[in-house]
Structure formats: structure tokens, C-alpha cells
Amino acid sequence: MMPLSKHTNNQSRQMEPEANVSPLIIVDWGTTNFRAYLVSRAVHEYGTCQAKVATSDGLQSVLGNYPEVLASHIGHWLKSAEPIPILLSGMVGSPNGWIEVPHIACPGNIQKLAQNAHRVRDFNKGNTWIIAGLSGHSISGHFDVMRGEEVQYFGAASIIKEQNLPTPEIICFPGTHNKWIDASANAEGQLEQFSTSMTGEVFSLLAKHSLLSNSISEHSSWQHKAFLEGLDNSASAGGIMHQLFTVRSLQLSGAHTNDAGEAYLSGLLIGSEIRSMLNTPNQSKDKNVAIVGANDLTMRYKSALEHLGHSAFTIDAEEATIAGALKIAQHLNPQA
């Protein structure tokens, strides 16, 4: 079971009368993955994850059968006498998802996310909501969007506060399309600006569908030394488009083997991303960064950030999703 608050074991909190509220089903439904959590709740919006479903039934594989797929994965949780509220976030609310829920213009907050949630009336007796994403402007001043990370952002902010973690200046959400949020520029309880980097998708495309795929061994173990070399070389003359070819050329010269290819390519891309997002004229060189994501990827980013002179700590993406959804549920509807 996954406790979602430091107050779970707080004796003074346990002395207060506990008022039972209905469980909550939280679904993070993205392009490639489906994650659902059954969360028991008490007063004060704290909860505990009782069960989890994780599959590869993302939007690209569902082909429009959203109600059927959702029911197949969580139907066994919906057999209680009273409907259990369901909150869905992620790409499920995009134009290519189940129901399009328009982005909310930043600044965004918990109340806005709740107010603009779309109620799905023909599923689970109307006790189902899809959370809207956010739109805003990026570090370059261009229009940018997110779906799913807004829930994780507010959940991560709650976890940081409740667990007395160091206040980060930047919060990073690594994945297919990474999000970078300047937390120091946001008022408390608000999300005002964020930037998207396509590092994850570009890595996958290059590793699987480009000339560089010939320089990557599918079954090699992680080569951390090559990763660090990629981080360092990402700052070399010629820029990232030139440095990418060194994945190939270093192997042709005999300096690398195919076993180093994946880690070296990852280091080049992540190093270029970190430098672009953090080393801007208006920011100090050294930053404290919170990384919200899955374990392997967050540790890779933590290692990269620390190697490049920053400090970093990690927050589990699932815990952030659940914590954020619990807060939204408090403002959504009396039934949730």
C-alpha cells in the first residue's frame, strides 16, 4: 500500500475522529500507458493506494474503445453498491482521446482544474470526470501545452510541503515529452509557465529508426561512463546536431563499442536538454531540481543534473499523480 501523506502515521492526527469518505479511482491515461489506482480516503484529503492496474493500453493502442478498455481494467473495483468516483487525466482528454477537454489557460490552480473537469455522464452512473490540461507560454515565449503533468505538479508541490523537502527552483517531469517548470516563478498554488522538450521521443526515434540504430546494442547493460561522456560532449563545439553523429563516428574509430551507444546517445540528448533549460541568461548556474517520474529515468536525470553542477532529488510520479488527484477531488463535486 502507498501512503500519500506524512500525516498517515502522525499520532495527533490519529486522535482526531476519522470520517470515512468513498474511495477514489485515479486514472493516468497517456499515449503509451494506462495507470489506474484505487485509493481509500479519510478526512483532510489524505489517502492510501489499495490497488493498482498498469498496462500498455495507451491511446495509440486503444483505437477508440475507451469505455470498454476502462471497464475491462477497473470494472472489478466498480461492483460496490454506490458508484466510486473516477478521475482521469492525461491524453485521454486530448482531441485524439475519449472526449476532448479544452486546455485551461495559465495561470492554473487546483480550483480551476476542478471547475473545468468534464463529467462523463454515460459511464459509472455519471461519477466520472476527465481533468483538463493547461496551456501557457514556454521559456522561449511560444505557446505550450500539457496534459497529466498538471496533476502531478500540484501533487508534487503537496508532497514537498508535507514532507519538508527542500524547495526546488525547477521541477522536471521526464518522459516522452518532458516538462520543465520554473517553480520559483510561480505563486504558491499556481502554475504559470512551463516548457516542453521532446527528448524522450527523439531518443526513441534515433535509437530505433535512424542510422544511429546500427550503433546501439539492444541487450547491452547500462554503461554509465559512456552516459557521462555524452553529458560532457553535449557542450562541445558544433552543437547537438553535430554531436549526434559522434554516436556513430566514435564506434567507427574504435573508441566506442555498440554496448556504449544507448547510454552515450542518452547522455548527449539529456545533457543538451538540461543546458538549454537551465543555463539561460536570467538564471543562476546552479539549480535545485525536483524530478518527478519513474525510477530508472528519474535516477538518470538526477545523475545528469548532479554531474552538470546542479542539486536534485526525486519524487515518484505515481505518488504525485495520486496526491494531485486527491486535492482536485476535494473541489470537484460533493460525490467525489
Image (cartoon, rainbow, N blue to C red):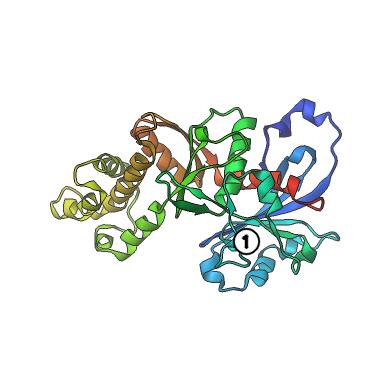
Q: Nearer the viewer, residue 88 or 11?
A: 88
Residue at the far left in the pictured view: 253
Q: Which residue corresponds to the image point at 54% horizontal and 39% vertical from the top-left?
A: 315
Count the numbered circles shown.
1
Q: Can you tell which quarter of the image residue 63 is in?
A: bottom right
Residue 138 versus residue 284 in the image, above or below? below
Left or right position of 178 against 235 = right
Residue at the far top in the pictured view: 12
Q: Position of residue 166 (x, y in %)?
A: 53, 27
Q: Which residue corresponds to the image point at 35% horizontal and 36% vertical from the top-left?
A: 280
Question: Which image quarter holds the N terminus?
Answer: top right
Q: Can you tell which quarter of the image residue 30 is in?
A: bottom right
Left or right position of 137 against 264 = right
Residue 48 versus residue 35 in the image, above or below? above
One can see residue 173 in this view: no
One can see residue 104 in this view: yes
Q: Amino acid at mark 1?
A: Val
Q: Position of residue 159 (x, y in %)?
A: 62, 36
Label 1, secondary structure: give it: loop
Residue at numbered disc 1: 101
Residue 242 versus residue 8 in the image, above or below? below
Q: Nearer the viewer, residue 208 or 198?
A: 198
Q: Position of residue 304 (x, y in %)?
A: 37, 39
Q: Would you call the spot at circle 1 few (<14 residues within 10 Å), some (14-19), or many (20 or more)?
A: many
Q: Position of residue 298 (x, y in %)?
A: 46, 43
Left or right position of 187 against 9 = left
Q: Can you tell which quarter of the image residue 319 is in?
A: top right
